[in-house]
Image (tube, grey):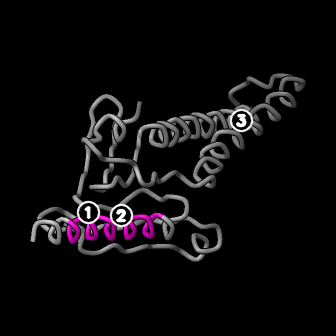
Amino acid sequence: MSYIDKSLGDGETVIARARFHWLYSLSAWLQLLIPAALLIALLSWASRQPNFLDTNNPVTWTLALIGLWFLLGLISFLRMMIRKWTVEVGITSHRFVEKYGVLSMRTNEIALPNIEGVKVNQSFLGRIFGYGTIRIEGTGVDAVTTPSIADPVGFVRAIQTAKEHVAQRFEAGKAAGA
């Protein structure tokens, strides 16, 4: 069960969840697969050459460099996938919630009435492919910037809709109490 689901209060529902864009996963996989393919191809070719493990052979040094590139790609891949699996961003009927972390956890929560401003940041490619970051500014809290998510404009729309519902409930409560 996700942190957002576990932290729901009485009568609170999840309105929207942000997700990482598919280009984030593609980037992680390419950082792993491109050096792996080059390493396999070069190993396959080099293993048929005489003295391919000789330290004076440039192929050996090329293999070592591509091997290092593969290890760096593997580390980057694991870092990106762990981030993807452990970051949660969502809107409930009462608040904005953002959670980071695996072993330790860090959360940012802003009550919907306290959200003062929401800014979308999309690059040129972000506009074309539909990804970007959102910066949420609230009263009494530091501004929160989400990781790059898919459909940031739709997520902002969900924030605005949730804020309108909170305002309507508040007005209905005032009218009933008057």
User: Front-most of 41 and 144?
Assistant: 144
Amino acid carrying mark 3 in the image: Ala
Percent of width and height locating residue 92: 34, 52
Percent of width and height locating residue 28: 60, 45
Quarter of the view holding residue 163: bottom left
Examine the rendered structure and indicate whether residue 63 appears above or below residue 107: above
> What residue is at 47 percent from the left and 59 percent from the top?
148
Examine the rendered structure and indicate whether residue 86 appears above or below residue 171: above
> What residue is at 34 percent from the left and 62 percent from the top?
145
Q: Secondary structure at mark 2?
A: helix
Residue ID for mark 3: 36
The magenta stretch is 155-172
Residue ID for mark 2: 162
> What residue is at 28 percent from the left and 70 percent from the top?
168
Pick whichever of labels 2 and 1 is earlier in the sequence.
Answer: 1
Image mark for residue 95: none
